[in-house]
């Protein structure tokens, strides 16, 4: 219990998450019980510190909870989190999940995550399509910036 109290007292200025050092102490603590683990993971998930939550779940070998976090990653279009969860579970990539993640990531403007997911799913044509879309958006943005900069110089 002293460990939980220490964690709660060590919150950053934002008041939502403990310092890195305290999280590390918890992660390697041998006295962390099930209730404490759940409290910590819930706090980290609430603060959207998904990778930190994954580290705690992985150290406790909570594979069902990691799978739930993996689904969260798909819903958020977060390839990095999905891949970390998959590796923690020692699971092979699921092409359907990857495609769903890639589509979600693309809709959210996370083009690199989308391309990574499509690539791991073996969908080369989709990687090229997303890459072209990204390049078009970046090109249009650059043209807009150039136009605005040119207009500012004329004024």
Image: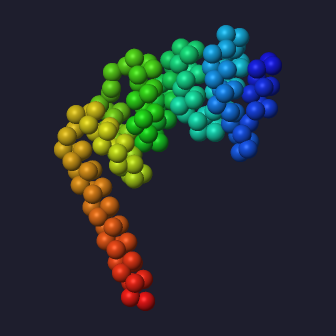
Asked which quadrant contains residue 126, the reply is top left
Q: Position of residue 9 (x, y in %)?
A: 79, 32
Q: Position of residue 62 (x, y in %)?
A: 55, 17
- State how many labels appear: 0
Q: Position of residue 71 (x, y in %)?
A: 46, 32
Query: Which quadrant is home to the N terminus?
Result: top right
Residue furthest out toward the left = 125
Q: Residue at x 40, y 84 (%)?
A: 153
**Residue 36 visible to the viewer:** yes
Query: Which quadrant is home to the C terminus?
Result: bottom left
Q: Position of residue 129 (x, y in %)?
A: 23, 50
**Residue 128 in the figure: left or right of residue 113:** left
In the displayed structure, 78 sits above or below 29; it is below
| In the foreground, 2 or 146 | 146
Asked which quadrant contains residue 85, the reply is top left
Q: Residue at x 55, y 33 (%)?
A: 50
In the displayed structure, 28 sits above or below 133; it is above
Asked which quadrant contains residue 95, the reply is top left
Q: Residue at x 37, y 19 (%)?
A: 91
Residue furthest out toward the bottom = 155
Q: Residue at x 71, y 18 (%)?
A: 35
| In the foreground, 142 or 108 | 142
Q: How is the protein colored in the picture?
A: rainbow
**Residue 65 visible to the viewer:** no
**Residue 124 in the figure: left or right of residue 106:** left
Residue furthest out toward the top = 30
């Amino acid at each position: 219990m002293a460990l939980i109290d220490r964690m709660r007292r060590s919150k950053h200025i934002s008041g939502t998450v403990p310092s890195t050092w305290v999280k590390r102490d918890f992660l390697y603590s041998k006295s962390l019980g099930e209730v404490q683990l759940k409290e910590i993971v819930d706090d980290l998930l609430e603060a959207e510190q998904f990778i930190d939550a994954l580290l705690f779940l992985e150290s406790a070998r909570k594979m069902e909870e990691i799978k739930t976090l993996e689904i969260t990653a798909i819903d958020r279009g977060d390839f990095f989190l999905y891949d970390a969860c998959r590796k923690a579970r020692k699971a092979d990539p699921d092409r359907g999940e990857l495609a769903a993640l890639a589509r979600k990531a693309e809709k959210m403007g996370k083009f690199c995550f989308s391309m990574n997911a499509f690539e791991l799913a073996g969908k080369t044509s989709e990687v090229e399509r997303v890459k072209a879309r990204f390049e078009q958006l970046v090109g249009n943005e650059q043209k807009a910036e150039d136009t605005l900069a040119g207009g500012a110089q004329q004024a």
